[in-house]
Image: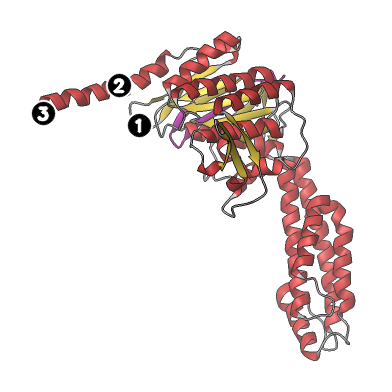
Amino acid sequence: MNTSKYELVIKDYRAIKEADITIEGITVLAGPNGAGKTTLARWFGYMVNSSNKYEYFCRNEAITEVESMLYEISRLSMALKLRDQITESMRKDCNAELRSVGPDAYKEKFMEIVNFIMHSITKENLSPQGDDFLKNHMKQRFNISGGEDTDGQEMFSKYIDEIEKNYDNILSEMHDKIDKRSFDKFKEIIRRHYPVGQFPNDISFCEDDNKLFDNGNLGVLLNLKEAVFLDTLEDELIDAEKEKYEISEKNEAIVSKIREIVNGDFTIEKEVFPISSMSRLFYTQNTKNGKLKIPLFEAAAGIAPMANTYKLLVSGKLTGESLLIIDEPELCLHPQWIVEYAKILIGINKDMGAKILISTHNPDMVAALQTIARKEGVLNTMRFYVATRCDDEMRYVYEDLGQEIGKIFDSFNIALSRIEEYGIESEDDE
């Protein structure tokens, strides 16, 4: 069970004037549209996933550079019309192997491919035009030149030496980045892989009292392995389906509850509709006349959050070392289902130990989470925050309400007051 606390502090960023948000169990963010709730949720995800996948991203960058060299070599072999070419299908197989074993283990195979091309570049295989093309290409593309009597094969031999040096440099830079774990590289990773635009100037993240980054260095998270965004799951869930996973008794209890709520089940089938990965997710509803199976994208909109949560549980994607991030889970849910979904979320936190971050506009969701958490004995680890607009600007400060929700309901009641005002205006007009 993960008992750690996670704290994100952001100041003067977009709509956020100041936010100091802690997640210990379930944390709920409330406030008007445009107050920065989604921004905070995303930055929790960026912090968790980018720090935990820091090494993966560094290795992936190196792999991409090696793939670029493979592409260059394959294109060259085809341009020269060699008898032994690196075809497109062969290159894809090479890329797959590279990603499977990693750039360190792949170097020997890479050099075998380069030498394979080298041995194909002979006077018998190269026409005079091909020899001239190769010499010009080596000079223009790689700044490799030779004397008047130097043929293309000799120049390509020099190219091989340069390629091996480049490969070694790629590996050296990769290991240097991994060993240093610098904050600058961490920021670069976030900018490159997520749609963040500007990185916050004033941001901090802690696991318990341990800062994730300090003095230019990036630390590690010990108890939180992944942040999962509920609304972007389809491709990941289908990938996860390929792996064997034995569902636990605790997960099975929650899964059974979801089946009961939707009166059916969810499955992933072979691709039938070439529309998107969503077309492979199916909802099978129990009816009086038997089972009705329909693609999930054709089902009622309220089924989607139930389906995604269900597949998270049965695929093993959600664990006690996960942070589940849900943006407005009440969308498209009937009030009764809002309460039922709140029960599911409380169960995921209590029984599995997963952390949950929710942003919401719905009073039923807020009240249900508080009431059920109190009944289940987990209210002490729940936190509610409300965004309040600064008087002099369109920016918001997030107030920590602890386990109380009164101020959140006060903000909801503003809408009721405005409805009453419209009613009074209508009567005056008459």
Task: Say which residue label 3 marks.
Answer: 429
The range drawn in magenta is 1-18
Element type at marker 2?
Answer: helix
Task: Say which residue label 2 marks.
Answer: 416
Amino acid of disc 2: Leu
Among the 4 quarters of the image, the one containing residue 281: top right
Q: Residue furthest left?
A: 430
Disc 1 residue crowd, few under 14, some 14–19, many 20+, Cα 10 Å: few
Q: Earlier in the sequence, mark 2 or mark 1?
A: 1
Q: Relative to 156, is 211 on the left or the right?
A: left
Amino acid of disc 3: Asp
Place of residue 189 in the rendered image (x, y in percent of width and height, measured from the top left): 64, 45
Label placed on residue 220:
none
**Does the image show residue 389?**
yes
The answer to whether marks 2 and 1 mark residues whose Cβ atoms lie closer than 8 Å is no
Q: Quadrant where the C terminus lies? A: top left
Residue at left offset 81%, top offset 66%: 163
Structural distance between the alpha carbons of marks 2 and 1: 24 Å
Residue at left offset 76%, top offset 43%: 178
Disc 3 residue crowd, few under 14, some 14–19, many 20+, Cα 10 Å: few
